[in-house]
Image (cartoon, rainbow, N blue to C red):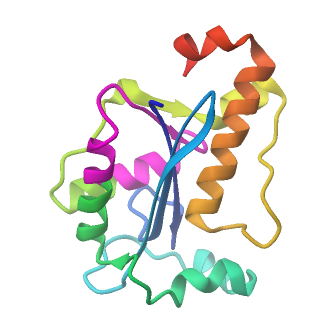
Amino acid sequence: MRDIMIDLETLSTRPDAMIVAIGAVQFGPEGLGDLFYCAVTPDGALGHIDPKTVAWWMGQGDEARSVFRDDGPNREPLAVALRDFRAWLDRKGKDLRIWGHGSSFDLPIIESAFRACGHPIPWSHRAIRDTRTLYELAGVKVEMPEGEKHHALSDAKAQALAVIRGVRALAADHIWSRCL
């Protein structure tokens, strides 16, 4: 499996948004693979906070807002979360294809965070893939399990499954070697 879906939860929609959670899943024609999740602590946090985005979060359900209460073992400062995420990606091998839900949100934000923390971006610009284009061409929608909206890992998994359905809808399985 060489495809990675990344989803972020943030406090802004700008490319320099403050990240509150990183979720990722490895996937391919056979389904979902390894998972990565880390909630980001506010200590040493970097990035823009938009009051409208914060107000939007406050209007979400308890499940979605749980990222702000997560004191578990998967909660780290941003620089550590990015280091751990890069190490996870490095274990996946070379020539990965990196997917984001749209070309202007998750990937520009995480790339900005890598730069701000002094980390190199762990993929080439040629590796980037956009879900929204595929979903529109294939006529598929992301199907979120009830109660799991706006959780970075749940969103990444649902988006990856929609990519798999989208590729299958567009062509026979041989397209995986060309498109994904």
Looking at the image, how many numbered discs can be counted on the residues? 0
The vertical placement of 5 against 56, above or below, is: above
Quarter of the picture containing the C terminus is top right
Q: Residue furthest left?
A: 118
Depth check, front residue: 106 or 74? 74
**Left or right relative to 95: residue 6:** right
Depth check, front residue: 101 or 163? 163
Instruction: Write down the region rendered in magenta.
Output: 86-111
Residue 102, magenta (yes or no):
yes
The vertical placement of 99 against 49, above or below, is: above
Image point 51% across, 73% down: which residue? 11
Q: Position of residue 125 (x, y in %)?
A: 35, 29
The vertical placement of 155 against 179, above or below, is: below
Q: Position of residue 173 (x, y in %)?
A: 68, 14
Image point 75% across, 83% down: which residue? 61
Q: Position of residue 170 (x, y in %)?
A: 77, 16
Q: Position of residue 144 (x, y in %)?
A: 78, 57
**Left or right relative to 43: residue 18:** right
**Left or right relative to 163: residue 178:** left
Residue 76, magenta (yes or no):
no
Depth check, front residue: 88 or 127? 88
Image point 44% across, 90% down: which residue? 71
Image point 75% across, 12% down: which residue? 171
